[in-house]
């Protein structure tokens, strides 16, 4: 069976093995050098003090044998002492290796603990980034970046799923009435022997119901896309968008007063244009002849602001608040007429939310509505650099 060691144990074994190998090499090298040194000294003593033959005092007959025995004993003693010292060093190396490996792997344990605590419901926690910068710091930063991307992806998925659920629920609710109208028209007309006029009347009723269903589905699809807020984002100036929309707006009988100061934001240009277009269309549609529309853009408290107000019928504060709900307009009733799908301000609300903005409505005492949008402002220079 293979022995499965932890990373800490493997690092300790590796560190200890390196120290052992270095100790063995050092001991062997020292042994060789001592053996050569002792051999030379013994030769000098036997041959002569300067290494050349010369007169020497009388030496015992067994002196050479004694010298070799002394050399052997010295080397043996060295090996014994070196083995003891190497054993002590190896033990210390193992202990120190274990401690050092634990300290080196501590950030990895922190990363593992953080990963275990993460779940689809909790992706806000991040791996601590230590100093100084090293490979583990780079790893922690990479994992945090990956978690940011995962969290963003899950948020976008939830947003898309939410928009799909809302689309399904609203479609089921709003299409029930036109389908019932078509079924009733068919049943009543075909209950007998209908003449040409009755068939034409049934056809007109069905056509009106189909057109209403088509407008409703188109509005719901646009609302779903707006809630998702998908698409590449660029620098957009709300003042420029308002100017472009007003050039094509049909406000012939209305007085339009504008005060357009730069209000750059980062957003999806198509959605921003749709948002402003819906606001202008709403201000025109729910106005009265010779009425007034006021539009201002600019910056306030570090935010890009767009305000649009219009004269019109008196709206209560509760009705003003409910106008942002799907299929609600004017008096707060569900819309089942040919005047529209009742999704204009709902789409505006969805686009504002998708761009991290805020929308507020306020009823004018004399009649009409004021709508204010606030977005995180974008500096033109920094956006251009990106």
Image (cartoon, rainbow, N blue to C red):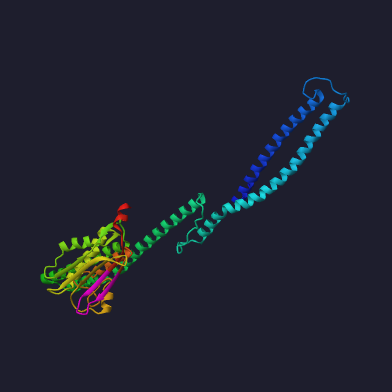
Give the x, y percent position of residue 16: 65, 45
The magenta span reads 359-372
Give the x, y percent position of residue 138: 48, 51
* 180 left or right, relative to 104: left
202 to 269, vertically: above or below: below
The residue lying at 59 percent from left, 50 percent from top is 7
Tell which of 47 and 246 is nearer to you: 47
The residue lying at 76 percent from left, 38 percent from top is 79
Evaluate whether residue 218 shows in this view: no
* 132 left or right, relative to 35: left
Tell which of 338 and 257 is nearer to you: 257
200 to 34, vertically: above or below: below
Q: Main secondary structure of the magenta part?
A: strand
In the image, residue 366 lies in the stretch drawn in magenta: yes
In the image, residue 56 lies in the stretch drawn in magenta: no
47 to 86, vertically: above or below: above
Count up the numbered dots: 0
Give the x, y percent position of residue 89: 70, 45
Give the x, y percent position of residue 186: 19, 71
- Specify the quadrant of the image occupied by residue 34: top right
Evaluate whether residue 245 shows in this view: yes
Tell which of 372 and 81 is nearer to you: 81
The residue lying at 74 percent from left, 40 percent from top is 82
Tell which of 91 and 78 is nearer to you: 78
* 34 left or right, relative to 226: right
């Amino acid at each position: 069976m293979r022995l499965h060691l932890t990373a800490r144990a493997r690092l300790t074994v590796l560190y200890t093995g390196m120290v052992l190998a270095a100790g063995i090499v050092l001991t062997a090298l020292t042994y060789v050098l001592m053996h050569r040194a002792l051999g030379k000294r013994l030769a000098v003593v036997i041959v002569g003090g300067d290494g050349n033959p010369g007169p020497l005092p009388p030496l015992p007959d067994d002196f050479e044998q004694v010298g070799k025995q002394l050399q052997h004993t010295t080397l043996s003693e060295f090996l014994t002492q070196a083995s003891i010292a190497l054993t002590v060093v190896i033990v210390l190396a193992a202990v120190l290796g274990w401690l050092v490996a634990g300290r080196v792997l501590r950030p990895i344990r922190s990363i593992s603990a953080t990963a275990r605590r993460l779940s689809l419901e909790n992706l806000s926690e991040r791996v601590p980034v230590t100093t100084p910068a090293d490979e583990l710091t780079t790893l922690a930063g990479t994992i945090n970046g990956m978690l940011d991307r995962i969290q963003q992806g899950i948020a976008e998925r939830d947003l898309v799923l939410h928009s799909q659920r809302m689309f399904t629920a609203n479609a089921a609710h709003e299409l029930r009435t036109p389908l019932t109208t078509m079924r009733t028209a068919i049943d009543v007309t075909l209950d007998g022997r209908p003449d040409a006029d009755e068939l034409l009347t049934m056809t007109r009723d069905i056509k009106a119901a189909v057109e209403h269903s088509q407008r409703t589905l188109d509005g719901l699809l646009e609302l779903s896309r707006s809630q998702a807020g998908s698409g590449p984002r660029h620098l957009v100036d709300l003042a420029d968008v308002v100017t472009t929309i007003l050039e094509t707006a049909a406000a012939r009988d209305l007085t339009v007063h504008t005060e357009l100061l730069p209000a750059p934001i980062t957003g999806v240009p198509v959605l921003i244009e749709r948002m402003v277009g819906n606001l202008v269309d709403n201000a025109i549609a729910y106005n009265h002849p010779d009425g007034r529309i006021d539009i201002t853009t600019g910056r306030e408290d570090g935010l890009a602001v767009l305000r649009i107000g219009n004269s019109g019928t008196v709206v209560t504060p509760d009705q003003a608040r409910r106008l942002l709900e799907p299929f609600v307009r004017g008096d707060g009733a569900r819309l089942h007429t040919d005047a529209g799908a009742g999704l204009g301000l709902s789409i505006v609300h969805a686009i504002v939310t998708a761009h991290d903005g805020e929308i507020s409505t306020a009823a004018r005492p004399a009649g009409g509505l004021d709508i204010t949008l606030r977005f995180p402002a974008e500096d033109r220079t920094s956006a251009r650099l990106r």
